[in-house]
Image: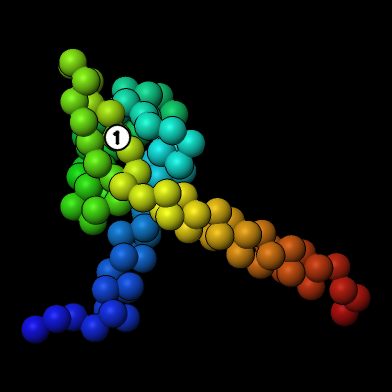
Amino acid sequence: MQRPLYQMKADFFKTLGHPVRIRVLELLSQRDHAVSEMLVEIGVEAANLSQQLSILRRAGLVTARREGLSVTYELTSPQVAELLAVARVILTGVVTGQAEALEQPA
């Protein structure tokens, strides 16, 4: 039995519901990154980053390739970067709206 699309969308957004996973996707939106580079940029323990990368890999959002002793990750689709850019636009609008509301006289 196939799951409804709305359930699949909910699961997709749950996958995005962790700050480390979002930061990983933001970095990979710029270019492919080795795990060692991401550790420096994100500032979490290697085990935590590995766990988050595994979740993103299982969800089909990133792929990994071994290059000698290091592993490099990349986005599976440029649309992931587009989704993050749209989220930024939406959040910027929300924050701007909240700031404007606070500036209104009571």
Within the image, what quadrant is residue 31 found in? top left
Residue 19 percent across, percent down from the top left: 41, 49
Quadrant into which the C terminus falls: bottom right
Q: Is residue 25 visible?
A: yes
Q: Amino acid at mark 1?
A: Tyr
23 relative to 61 in the view: left or right: right
Q: Residue at x 36, y 58 (%)?
A: 16
Q: How is the image coloured?
A: rainbow
Judged from this view, the residue extending furthest toward the left is: 1
Residue 36 percent across, percent down from the top left: 32, 23
Give the SS element for disc 1: strand
Q: Nearer the viewer, residue 59 or 14?
A: 59
Within the image, what quadrant is residue 68 found in? top left
Quadrant into which the N terminus falls: bottom left
Report which residue position mark 1 lands on.
Answer: 73
User: Up-down: is 29 above or below 58?
Assistant: above
77 relative to 51 in the view: left or right: right
Q: Residue at x 72, y 68 (%)?
A: 98
